[in-house]
Image: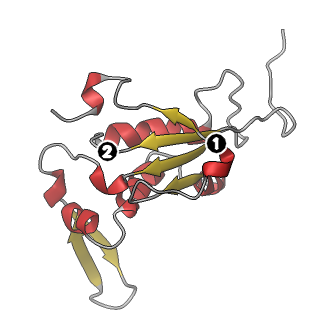
Amino acid sequence: MKTFTATPADIEKSWILIDAEGVVLGRLASIIAMRLRGKHKATFTPHMDMGDNVIVINADKIQLTGNKRDKPNYWHTGFPGGIKSRTTGQILEGAHPERVVMQAVKRMLPGNKLSRSVMTNLRVYAGAEHPHEAQSPEVLDVKSMNSKNTRS
């Protein structure tokens, strides 16, 4: 018996819509990362982009457990003494709350060229509106998958 290796002709991508309202960030990010990579498929091939296109709405309404809302996020401007920080809560209340979800998913993927191209299949929106109705995405209910996915 030979090992199956997918070719670009074998890959079938679908569109998935996930509502992030009330869902715990880490659990949501791990589900999204698995779907983006294609590990949920029986034909998974590690060196191919097998994953689906994922649309996440209501990213500004995600939940964080513990004191993670007060955790500082650091970045450096590249200039001497240019370290800056914001808490996760400040980012969620700011102009681009979808960046919290994007960063969480990015950190759950391996740091290579394939993962950077896989991240282009992720679209995150702060509100309930999205411009991808023409793709007729299939709704994935993350809340009902596990009771721990929502914060009580």
Q: Earlier in the sequence, mark 1 or mark 2?
A: 2
**Which residue is farthest bottom?**
80
In this rendering, the answer to whether 116 lies above or below 36 is: below
* Residue at 32% in and 91% down: 80
Residue type, mark 2 in image: Glu
Q: Under tag 2, what secondary structure?
A: loop
Residue 34: x and y, percent? Answer: 52, 35
Task: Find residue 136 and name its label.
Answer: 1
Q: Which residue is mark 2?
A: 21
Task: Find residue 44 and name its label.
Answer: none
Residue type, mark 1 in image: Ser
Question: Is 136 left, or right, of 10 in this rendering?
Answer: left
Residue 136: x and y, percent? Answer: 64, 42
Picture quadrant where residue 37 is located? top right
Counting other residues with Cα less than 10 Å from the Cα at mark 1, is it few (<14), some (14-19), or many (20 or more)? few
**Which residue is farthest top?**
1
Which quadrant, please, contains the C terminus? top left
Question: Is 47 left, or right, of 6 in this rendering?
Answer: left
